[in-house]
Amino acid sequence: MDKRKELKVAALENGTVIDHIPAASLFHALRILKLDKVNNQIYFGTNLHSEKYGLKGIIKIRDRYFKNEEINKIALVAPTATIIEIKDFYVVRKENVDTPEIVENFVKCFNPKCITNHQAVPTRFKVISDKGELKLRCHYCEKITTKDTMEFK
């Protein structure tokens, strides 16, 4: 008797696949994209085998395409992610996320004394890479926000 070795998931007719998410970042990506609050059909998997990364996560969401700001959020928590857009069962766009140089108005500064936490000033950060880890330097207070202290608006 043959044993089933794969789990098959229906192909998307229209929507987006976010592939190559670091396994440890999958639930963070779901939260920052607020996918726990949408009515779209969503498949996700974590700790899946990946030839390239060892383990990975994947999100498939029906009838949803992401804006640039949302893709920048993905790049901050999953810089290895690939965005695949599908229309009528065909891949119409496939690209790796690019880490932005500047992040504006969607990450909160972790410094409670920063002007952005007290006045109607939009946040602005320079993205820096320190030994492979992404960090954000606040334009106003120059404090460094790390992945552990990163809070999305």
Image: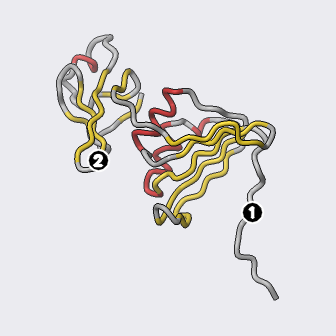
The type of colouring in the image is: secondary structure
Q: Residue at x 75, y 46 (%)?
A: 12
Nearer the observer, 75 or 151: 75
Question: Where, by quadrant of the figure, is residue 123 drawn?
Answer: top left
Marks 2/1: CA distance? 34 Å
- Does the CB distance between marks 2 and 1 fall below 8 Å? no
- Quadrant location of the N terminus in the rendered image: bottom right
Left or right side of 12 for 99: left
Res 86 → quadrant: top right
- The structure residue drawn at horizontal position 60% and vertical position 36%, both measured from the top left corner, is 37
Question: Residue 40's mark?
Answer: none
Identify the mark nearer the N-term, 2 or 1. Answer: 1
Where in the figure is residue 14, as x and y percent of width and height? 75, 38
**Element at badge 2?**
strand
Crowd around label 2: few <14 · some 14–19 · many ≥20 (10 Å):
few
Residue 146, how many percent across, how many down? 27, 41
Q: Which residue is mark 1?
A: 8
Mark 2 lies on residue:
133
Residue 74 vs residue 121: left or right?
Answer: right
Q: Position of residue 138 (x, y in %)?
A: 24, 26
